[in-house]
Image (cartoon, rainbow, N blue to C red):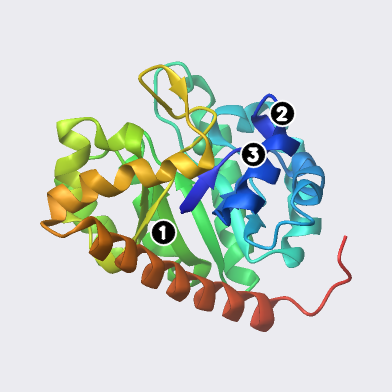
């Protein structure tokens, strides 16, 4: 099982979720929403070798935590993974869009200066603004657009820029989500849950539930579930190789925090 976008620290009992992932051997990209959450979230996974903890600043709270960008800069050398970052264009967050842009631009440039990172990116209702920045900073690393809900035209642009995608059962339950997934390059797709925010039939998704995306992907790609699983594993392997180049070229060995 691969959950490439999960908020482990925001579950009611994070330690229990981590233990379950460890037992199941679930691979998790554990994203954070503020730089100050990174260290504690990373500590949660000390005994879980298949969990990676990404350093993030979520666009929906960027205006409240913009001061933490300096902490972001202090921590970035310690990880190959950045997220959740991005832009949120929904009306509730539009008043803070300028602050979001400030944060996102800062993080993209910091990732570029660091030699590249794996970036888990939120782009809801702000796809064009996100893609403009990724295009302007091709050395920022490997962008993974999480739960992408833009247009097909925007998707095609994202593919041309080199984006990867993480898709989950919540996204794939809609016809529009499945239509987008059908167009995504299979070698650049990973599964996710966005738990505990991602739900299915009002039930909170756990990281292992990322596997619920597999039958939908098999349907839209015209493949067997076994072949989809194989494709996901290959993509994860390649992602791990990319991440290790970022870690080693950009980050001198720093003591484990
Ligand atoms: Mn998220």
Q: How many numbered marks does the figure carry?
A: 3
Label 1 CB-ligand 1 distance < 8 A: no
Q: CA distance from mark 1 to mark 3?
A: 27 Å
Residue 57: % across, % down: 63, 41
Mark 2 is surrounded, within 10 Å at the Cα level, by few (under 14), some (14 to 19) or many (20 or more) other residues, namely few
Task: Look at the image and tell me whether residue 30 can be seen.
Answer: yes
Q: Secondary structure at mark 3?
A: helix
Q: Is residue 237 above or below residue 4?
A: below
Q: Position of residue 133 (x, y in %)?
A: 42, 55
- The residue where tag 1 is placed is 134
Q: Residue at x 57, y 68 (%)?
A: 112
Instruction: Please name the residue shown 75% across and 44% down the image.
Output: 41
* Callout 2 secondary element: loop
Tag 2 residue: 13
Q: Is mark 3 within 8 Å of ligand 1?
A: no
Specify which label sits upstream in the sequence, 2 or 3: 3
- Residue 125 appears anywhere in the view: no
Q: Are marks 1 and 3 in contact (CB under 8 Å)?
A: no
Residue lying at the far left in this picture: please name it. 222
Identify which residue is drawn at 29% across, 68% down: 187
Q: Residues within 10 Å of mark 1 (few under 14, many from 20)?
A: many
Identify the residue under disc 3.
Answer: 8
Residue toward you, 174 or 138: 174
Which percent across, then down, holds residue 63? Answer: 64, 28
For this view, does 239 lie left or right of residue 9?
left
């Amino acid at each position: 099982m691969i959950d490439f976008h999960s908020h482990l620290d925001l579950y009611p009992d994070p330690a229990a979720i981590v233990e379950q992932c460890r037992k199941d051997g679930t691979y998790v990209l554990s994203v954070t929403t503020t730089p100050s959450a990174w260290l504690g979230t990373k500590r949660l996974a000390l005994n879980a070798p298949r969990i990676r903890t990404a350093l993030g600043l979520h666009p929906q709270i960027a205006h409240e935590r913009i001061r933490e960008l300096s902490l972001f800069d202090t921590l970035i050398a310690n990880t190959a993974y950045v997220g959740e970052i991005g832009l949120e264009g929904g009306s509730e967050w539009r008043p803070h869009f300028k602050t979001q842009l400030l944060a996102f631009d800062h993080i993209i440039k910091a990732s570029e200066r660091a030699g590249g990172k794996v970036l888990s990116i939120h782009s809801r209702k702000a796809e064009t603004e996100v893609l403009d920045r990724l295009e302007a900073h091709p050395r920022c690393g490997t962008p993974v657009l999480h739960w992408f809900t833009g247009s097909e035209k925007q998707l095609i642009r994202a593919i041309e820029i080199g984006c990867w995608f993480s898709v989950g059962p919540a996204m794939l339950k809609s016809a529009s989500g499945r239509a987008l997934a059908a167009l995504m390059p299979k070698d650049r797709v990973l599964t996710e849950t966005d738990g505990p925010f991602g739900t299915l039939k009002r039930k909170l998704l756990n990281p292992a539930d990322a596997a619920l995306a597999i039958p939908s992907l098999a349907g839209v790609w015209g493949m067997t579930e076994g072949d989809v699983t194989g494709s996901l594993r290959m993509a994860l392997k390649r992602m791990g190789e990319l991440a290790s180049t970022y870690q080693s070229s950009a980050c001198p060995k720093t003591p484990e925090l």
